[in-house]
Image (cartoon, helix red, strand yellow):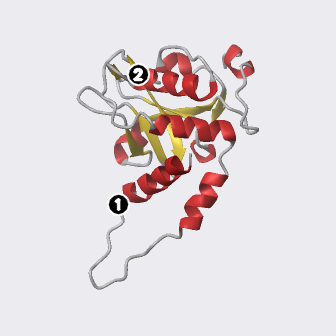
Amino acid sequence: MQIRRLLLALTLALSMGHSAHADEPAKVEPAAAETSMLSEYGSAAEQLVDQALEYLGVRYRFGGTSPTTGLDCSGLVLNVFRNAIGLDLPRTASEMAKLGDKIGRQELKPGDLVFFNTMRRTFSHVGIYLGDGKFVHAPSRGGKVRIETISSSYWSKRFNGARRLVDDAAEASTAPLTALR
């Protein structure tokens, strides 16, 4: 578990893309900041993030639901939720977008689902928010499961909304799943 936390902290730090000039000392963010951020995760959210990171590098496959043969975006999400907290989700991103509590972009917490319009229809793509403006997803044909920044111009323009399936007490609840909102 500690190795996964370190991996997440390093991945988030490296993906920020800070560049330093040769004549300037490199700015080093204190490890305590990442540790503090990670310690705020609820147990279910932490399990979701840890599980999602295990799929990094798995190849994309349209309609894919197996890490062995490849995953699409919703296949990744359903595997993560099933394996991390035992929650079975519907097969498609648009069906997933009907579950849980609708939340704003400013309210995002690790483990929340983030939705995008990538195929000229709402909720055509889904990923899992990791924190610090990052999300993990299975991108598209020829790609692999990876981490991206939600505020990049591509993703920001296509952002459709977010849903929280795990409550603040970090317990998986089937109640939000039965009430389609």
Can you give x and y, in whole percent of width and height, for residue 147 in the image?
A: 40, 43
Image-quadrant location for residue 85: top right
Report the amino acid beneath label 1: Gly
Distance (Cα) linking label 2 and label 1: 31 Å
Q: Give the residue pinned by disc 1.
A: 17
Q: Please provide percent x and percent y for residue 52.
A: 48, 35
> Dot 1, how many residues are within 10 Å of its Cα: few (below 14), some (14-19), or many (20+)?
few
Is label 1 in a helix, a strand or a loop? loop
Which kind of residue does numbered mark 2 sit on?
Arg
Is 32 above or below relative to 163? below
- Residue found at the far left of this picture: 142
**Helix, strand or loop at mark 2:** loop
Q: Residue at x 42, y 52 (%)?
A: 11
Q: Quadrant of the C terminus?
A: top right
Residue 33 as seen in the image, left or right of residue 146: right
Foreground: disc 2 or disc 1: 1
Query: Are there few (<14), some (14-19), or many (20+) residues within 10 Å of tag 2?
Result: few
Q: Residue at x 60, y 53 (%)?
A: 38
Q: Are marks 2 and 1 in contact (CB under 8 Å)?
A: no
* Residue 144, numbered label: none
Question: Which residue in the structure is indicated by mark 2?
Answer: 121
Direction bottom: furthest residue: 23
Quadrant position of the N terminus in the picture: top right
Decide which of tag 2 and tag 1 comes sooner along the chain: 1
Residue 169 point in image, percent of width and height: 76, 38
Number of marks in picture: 2
Residue 75: where, in percent of width, then height?
A: 44, 20
Identified at 34% across, 23% down, the residue is: 119
Of residues 47 and 169, the one drawn nearer to the viewer in this rendering: 47
